[in-house]
Amino acid sequence: MNTKNNRRARETRERLKLALLDMLARDDILDVTVSALCDEAEVNRSTFYSHYDSVAELMDEIEQEIGKDIFEKVAEVYDDDKSMFSAEYLLAILGHLKENRSFYHAYLRQSVGRRNIDWGFGQLLEQFVRPMMKRLGVTDIETAYYFEFFKEGFIAVISLWLDGGCREEPETIAHCITSMLNHPEFEIE
């Protein structure tokens, strides 16, 4: 019996996920076929279809697992009194990124992945950053420009870190980011 919880089924699903991540390092998700994925994972197409209806469904499952994990990591350090840009939050996020570097390295190169990341940042802006900035008396337009600058810079730093194989520790990257955000030369009189 092939259920989601039996050991062989879990192992097969894991092989398919790892094979997809390997392929995404080389190919766009839109170019990945079930046949090619099955060849990569060394499973039959019928085995694939006993677990998933499509490559997109497999990718959705990976995204959901990764998303759940990052929210759990941030929730562990959550504190109403901390800024969303504090070192504690950054370290939780960076630790998660390093643990899942093969996923993010491939994901950031995918057009679909970048749209989803932009959507996630949009949620962060609307649910946390904009309300925080309003409390600080920052206008909506200033918040939008500041956040866009932060988002693109953050993604660029993370991409560079992932491209280098995450050689630096998360603390080093968090220090770089917080130093840039708090650098006195960026203050406007």
Image (spheres, grey):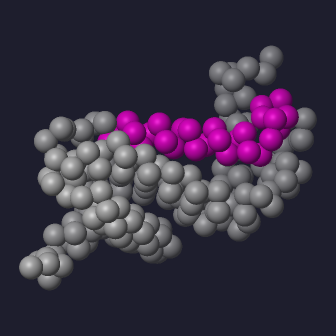
Q: Which residues are magenta?
A: 48-74
From what the image shows, is residue 100 above or below residue 51? below
Q: Residue at x 67, y 31 (%)?
A: 10
Residue toward you, 181 or 11: 181
9 w.r.t. 86: above or below: above
Location of residue 65 in the rendering, given as x and y in whole percent from the top left corner: 54, 38
Q: Residue at x 39, y 65 (%)?
A: 148
Judged left or right of residue 148, residue 120 is right
Quarter of the image with the C terminus is: bottom left
Q: Position of residue 135 (x, y in %)?
A: 16, 47
Rendered residue at 63%/38% (across/down): 61
Tell me residue 166's x, y (percent). Answer: 42, 67
Q: Position of residue 128 (x, y in %)?
A: 30, 45
Above or below: residue 20 compared with residue 49? below
Q: Is residue 64 visible?
A: yes
Q: Quadrant of residue 158?
A: bottom left
Q: Give the residue at x 64% y 62%.
A: 110
In the rendered image, the quadrant that contains the N terminus is top right
